[in-house]
Image (cartoon, rainbow, N blue to C red):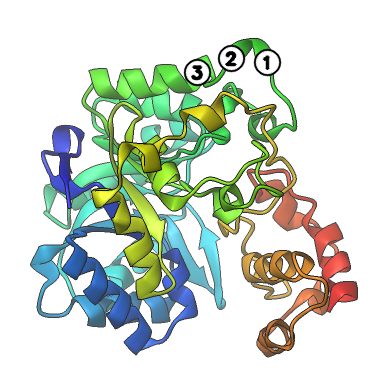
Amino acid sequence: MNYRTLGRTGLSVSEIGLGGEWLERHNTEEVRQVVARCEEKGINILDCWMSEPNVRSNIGKALAGHREKWYIQGHIGSTWQNGQYVRTRELGAVKAAFEDLLARLRTDYIDLGMIHFVDEPAEFRRVMEGDFFEYVKELKAQGSIRHIGMSTHNPAVGKLAAEHGEIEMILFSVNPAFDMLPATEHIDDYFADSYDETLGGIAPERAELYRLCEQNQLGITVMKGYAGGRLFSAERSPFGIALTPVQCIHYALTRPAVASIMVGFDTVEHVDAATAYETASMEEKDYASILAKAPRHGYYGQCTYCGHCAPCPAGIDIAMVNKLRDLAVMQETVPDTLKAHYRQLSANADACIGCRSCESRCPFGVKIADRMAETRELF
């Protein structure tokens, strides 16, 4: 495993990290196995944005006795309320969720205290000028967090973070498809179904962000490096050709200021597939020939299972329902195993009331209620 310095934090992090989101789907032993394989492969950084209690506890059990081997990105503002994830800036809920994170991870500090999910410049200013950021600074002053970070999908917000001075790193969505789009203050515009082809590749706003982060020593860790797995399929990729995990990882790691890519692992085999990057040839890493043929960005309206649509008033795990739907439509008939998994959900598409509140939170412009109706028919 190779290691990189994460900006001015000075932390030496593995260039491949563990994105904890998919661990929510697994039991204590399965989480332990994934974490153990990561350690075996030299991975030393993990991201835990999830507020769900069980996954936090399972990660804590997996880290017990060797917490010092890991750098943890723990999110501030991701809370669990009435059985659902809720992003909030309300300090009472924020403080309780952070204390819960420490307790369940069995630690008294978080290495990278992440201001959770800021995608609008106006919200950035509200957060940084209000009592939320004062609380974050208090956590750092008392040693409960060692460094201050922020997660965002928006290069305009990333630029504000890079210029702020007190934010030391960001978690940012990086993959070759997303990089085709220019920045805008309107989140839906980032994921439009076309772009100005005179760009000839990466959007200048995103290129500027990477350069600014490099210049200001603001380290980047990467989320959504695989775009929800769509880049692995020629039919689903905007490039008309499949990328490999190694190519996606190499793309992310070749952006300026990027120190590590957080990869979601369901199994130890997924860990092996990602860490194969460390011994891959340059031919295996090559993505340039594919990018040269990219006709357009193709992700507007498609779910990448990020979970920001939550909470659902009907209790639906929207990301999981969408994942099962997408797996189902890729096959001629819906497999019985998928049907069984779908039926075992505590709430599925049948429970959707069509309120569309989730759609206002989706950074990808997905018409979720319509997808729920399609899923009801499919299953």
In the drawing, does residue 268 fall left or right of residue 372?
Answer: left
Q: Residue at x 75, y 32 (%)?
A: 193
Q: Secondary structure at mark 1?
A: helix
What residue sits right under mark 2 in the picture? 200
What residue sits right under mark 3 in the picture? 205
Q: Secondary structure at mark 3?
A: helix
Query: In the rendered image of this protein, does residue 348 appear above or below residue 151?
Result: below
Q: Amino acid at mark 1?
A: Glu
In this view, the mark in front (1 or 3): 1
Image coordinates of residue 93 in percent, x first then y, are 43, 64
Residue 186, quarter of the rendered image: top right
Q: Amino acid at mark 2?
A: Gly
Q: Nearer the viewer, residue 130 or 272?
A: 272
Give whichever of discs 3 and 2 has the lower sequence position.
2
Q: Residue at x 36, y 52 (%)?
A: 262
Q: Residue at x 79, y 78 (%)?
A: 334
Residue 345, quarter of the rendered image: bottom right
What residue sits right under mark 1 in the picture? 197
Image coordinates of residue 50 in percent, x first then y, are 43, 65
Residue lying farthest to the top in this orientation: 198
Q: Residue at x 64, y 36 (%)?
A: 239
Image coordinates of residue 326 in percent, x first then y, are 72, 64
Query: Which image quadrant: the C terminus?
Result: bottom right
